[in-house]
Image (cartoon, rainbow, N blue to C red):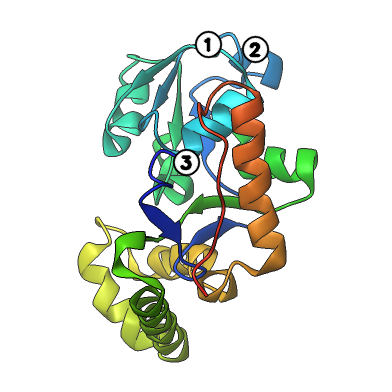
């Protein structure tokens, strides 16, 4: 919504959690009601993870920490809990942390929808024709990667931040799939619902103007 006057959403390239998503983790086995009273380390306030957290626990106290430092700082005792994204969702248990809440599961419980976590946008000033061509090229690129998974995974390992190949393959499977080719009607409804709830809760200042480049 902050960029919607100048950017439109592309239907391809998104990351969607199908009953999973950002997690609140802690060394302690807090309940959902207990964790709402704690201060949580978060990876940024303009993230879907933060928006989902605020919907789960309105007004919860947070502190912004670089995403790759959240687990180390929680382990050091600087924060009682952390909101983890990216590969941390697969590696937190190796550090001795416990999952308190999976916000993707919570979101599905509340809405019955997948949790949209990221997407691609394109400048409106490019004009409808070029915007559509760019969207088509992106979709073809994603389709190629899905059709040549081993090749794509081998290339992506250079960006894997020390993930072993097995975990990297699992992580890619979680967030690069048919939903990445196109959100679909359910995925688009999930985006609309998330932004609408964020606006009604006073977290997002603008009403979302959702239009997808076709």
Which numbered disc, 3 or 1, marks the residue that appears first in the sequence?
3
Report, in whole angstroms, how far the alpha carbon at label 2 lies from the one at label 1. 7 Å
In the picture provided, is 208 more to the left or to the right than 142? right
> From the viewer's perspective, is residue 108 above or below residue 184?
above
Q: Mark 2–mark 1 contact, CB under 8 Å?
A: yes
Q: Which of 99 and 146 is in front in this view?
A: 146
Residue under label 2, please give it. 34
Q: Is mark 3 on a helix, strand or loop?
A: loop
Q: What is the number of callouts on the image?
A: 3
Which numbered disc, 2 or 3, marks the residue that appears first in the sequence?
3
Q: Residue drawn at (70%, 66%), measured in percent from left and top?
A: 185
Q: Is mark 2 on a helix, strand or loop?
A: helix
Quadrant location of residue 84? top left
Q: Position of residue 115 (x, y in %)?
A: 62, 49
Select label 3 or label 1 by which is in front. 3
Q: Nearer the viewer, residue 119 or 147?
A: 119
Q: Can residue 18 be seen in this view?
A: no
Q: What element carries label 1?
A: loop
Q: Residues within 10 Å of mark 2 (few under 14, many from 20)?
A: few
Residue 1's disc number = 3
> From the viewer's perspective, is residue 212 above or below residue 116?
below
Q: Position of residue 106 (x, y in %)?
A: 70, 38
Q: Mark 2–mark 3 contact, CB under 8 Å?
A: no
Q: Which of 51 and 176 is in front in this view?
A: 51
Residue under label 1, please give it. 38
Quadrant location of residue 186? bottom right
In the picture provided, is 159 more to the left or to the right than 128? left
């Amino acid at each position: 919504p902050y960029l919607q006057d100048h950017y439109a959403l592309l239907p391809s390239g998104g990351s969607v959690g199908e009953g999973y998503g950002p997690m609140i983790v802690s060394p302690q086995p807090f309940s959902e009601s207990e964790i709402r009273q704690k201060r949580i380390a978060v990876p940024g306030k303009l993230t879907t993870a933060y928006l989902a957290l605020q919907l789960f626990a309105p007004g919860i106290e947070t502190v912004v920490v670089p995403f790759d430092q959240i687990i180390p700082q929680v382990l050091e005792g600087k924060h009682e809990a952390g909101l983890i994204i990216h590969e941390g969702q697969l590696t937190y248990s190796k550090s001795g942390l416990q999952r308190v809440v999976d916000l993707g599961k919570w979101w599905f419980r509340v809405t019955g929808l997948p949790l949209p976590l990221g997407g691609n946008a394109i400048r409106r000033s490019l004009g409808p024709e070029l915007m559509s061509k760019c969207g088509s090229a992106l979709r073809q690129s994603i389709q190629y990667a899905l059709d040549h998974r081993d090749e794509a995974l081998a290339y992506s390992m250079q960006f894997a931040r020390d993930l072993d190949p097995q975990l990297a393959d699992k992580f890619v499977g979680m967030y690069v799939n048919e939903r990445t080719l196109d959100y679909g009607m359910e995925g688009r409804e999930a985006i609309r619902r998330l932004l609408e709830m964020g606006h009604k809760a006073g977290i997002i200042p603008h009403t979302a103007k959702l239009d997808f480049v076709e």
